[in-house]
Image (cartoon, rainbow, N blue to C red):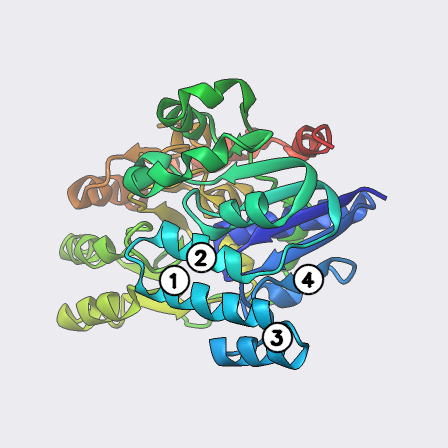
């Protein structure tokens, strides 16, 4: 049985993680021996990992450096205890994320298992990239690029030597690939596109498990799903909502997700008295009933790679307004299956307003999306051919 190692940070409720969950299901169905390496436990999606996937926590379950040192001392591993202490202190005082993660990789004992394939699966400038190269033994090593790397231009500078050591790099969109090759032209021959796998049947089944919206609102429901952070752009929603209400539209906007911008958005909602019109629903393990029941889906991101939540909205044939991030044009045909605009509050207002006011356009998008559904399950062959 072929052995595959996949390394990521934590299974939080995010697009990268939901895409990973789909891949894990596929790999299980195909009978591979898969080990998932997590930097830390406790993500919302951790309980959804298939039972035959082995899970290992990279930094163990100790809650502090002291506990890690003591554990090694108890085992008579005095050199490792000193190394853990020294590298942990270095990671605390260093000024760059790269150096911090480099020192952290030295805290971990090398994994002696030889895998057929090892995958670094997270943002491009992150610990899994370092860990796969420094700490795992594998016949083939792959890096997975989910983001627009131009956003991480400065952070990525010290990672070049690591990417050069991978056997292959997958990018989740054509535009994402172009951005990556623009930064690393010497890696063009071993870089290709791997569109995120969406389990359409499974998602539709989950959407029927429970009802979504619990209020009695009869107007137009707008939905946005994603981590509450600067990248996803939810902080612009209050301004858009104010303008939609000024025009007299009966709309309610719901956001699913949590994140570092929660308090900021909450304060904007209170400041503009939007408590009845802009609802933060928090994380939902199963967001699909909300996709099924909404009238319009809006993705106001500043930057993305492929954007899983946009792909999920397409499964439900929802009229879509999205900003023009990397990969948006690969999912939406502007004016045919949705509306693509620049990241700008006024332009988003006009696009949403057009869908709110014109039912015929909403219906046209829904029909076109229904006829435009593609099954991308064959993408798995690209991965398995690497073994």
- According to the picture, the residue beneath numbered tag 2 turns out to be 103
Point out the frontmost of discs 3 and 4: 3
Q: Give the mark nearer the N terminus: 1 vs 4.
A: 4
Give the structural element (helix, strand or loop) at label 4: strand
Q: Residues within 10 Å of mark 1 (few under 14, many from 20)?
A: many
Point out the frontmost of discs 1 and 4: 1
For image coordinates 41% across by 28% down, the residue present is 180
Image coordinates for residue 148, horizontal then vertical, percent: 37, 36
**Alpha carbon of mark 1 to alpha carbon of mark 4: how far?**
25 Å
Q: Residue 293 versus residue 228: which sits nearer the camera?
A: 228
**Alpha carbon of mark 2 to alpha carbon of mark 3: how far?**
18 Å
Classify residue 78 by image quadrant: bottom right
- According to the picture, the residue beneath numbered tag 4 turns out to be 55
Classify residue 256 by image quadrant: bottom left
Q: Tell me whether circle 3 and circle 1 mark residues in contact (CB < 8 Å).
A: no
For image coordinates 58% across by 32% down, the residue present is 373
Q: Which mark is residue 72?
A: 3
Point out the frontmost of discs 3 and 1: 3
Q: Give the mark nearer the N terminus: 2 vs 1.
A: 1
- According to the picture, the residue beneath numbered tag 1 turns out to be 91
Q: Residues within 10 Å of mark 2 (few under 14, many from 20)?
A: many
Q: Give the mark nearer the N terminus: 3 vs 4.
A: 4
**Alpha carbon of mark 4 to alpha carbon of mark 2: how far?**
23 Å
């Amino acid at each position: 049985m072929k052995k595959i190692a996949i390394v990521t940070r934590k299974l939080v409720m995010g697009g990268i993680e939901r895409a990973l969950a789909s891949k894990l299901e596929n790999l299980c169905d195909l009978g591979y021996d898969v080990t998932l390496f997590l930097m830390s436990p406790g993500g919302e999606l951790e309980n959804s990992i298939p039972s035959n996937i082995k899970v290992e926590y990279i930094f163990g379950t100790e809650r502090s450096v002291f506990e890690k040192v003591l554990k090694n001392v108890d085992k008579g591993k005095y050199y490792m205890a000193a190394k853990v202490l020294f590298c942990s202190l270095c990671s605390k005082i260093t000024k760059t994320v790269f150096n911090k993660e480099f020192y952290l990789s030295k805290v971990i004992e090398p994994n002696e298992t030889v895998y057929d394939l090892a995958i670094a699966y997270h943002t491009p400038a992150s610990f899994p990239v370092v860990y796969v190269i420094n700490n795992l033994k594998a016949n083939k090593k792959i890096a997975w690029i989910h983001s627009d790397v131009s956003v991480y231009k400065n952070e990525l500078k010290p990672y070049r030597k690591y990417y050069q050591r991978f056997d292959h790099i997958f990018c989740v969109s054509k535009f994402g690939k172009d951005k990556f090759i623009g930064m690393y032209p010497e890696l063009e021959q071993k870089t290709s596109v791997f569109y995120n796998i969406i389990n359409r049947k499974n998602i539709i089944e989950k959407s029927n498990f429970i009802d979504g919206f619990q209020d009695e609102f009869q107007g137009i429901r707008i939905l946005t799903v994603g981590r509450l952070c600067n990248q996803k752009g939810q902080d612009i929603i209050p301004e858009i909502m104010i303008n939609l209400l000024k025009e007299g539209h009966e709309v309610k906007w719901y956001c699913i997700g949590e994140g570092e911008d929660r308090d900021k958005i909450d304060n904007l909602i209170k400041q503009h008295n939007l408590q009845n019109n802009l609802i933060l629903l928090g994380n939902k393990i199963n967001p699909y009933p909300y996709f099924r029941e909404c009238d319009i889906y809006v993705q106001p991101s500043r930057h993305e790679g492929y954007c899983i939540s946009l792909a999920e909205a397409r499964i439900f044939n929802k009229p879509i307004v999205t900003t023009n991030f990397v990969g948006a044009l690969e999912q939406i045909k502007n004016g045919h299956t949705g509306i693509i605009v620049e990241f700008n509050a006024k332009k988003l207002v006009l696009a949403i307003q057009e869908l709110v006011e014109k039912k015929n356009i909403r219906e046209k998008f829904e029909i076109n999306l229904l006829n435009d559904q593609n099954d991308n399950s064959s993408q798995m062959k690209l991965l398995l051919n690497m073994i």
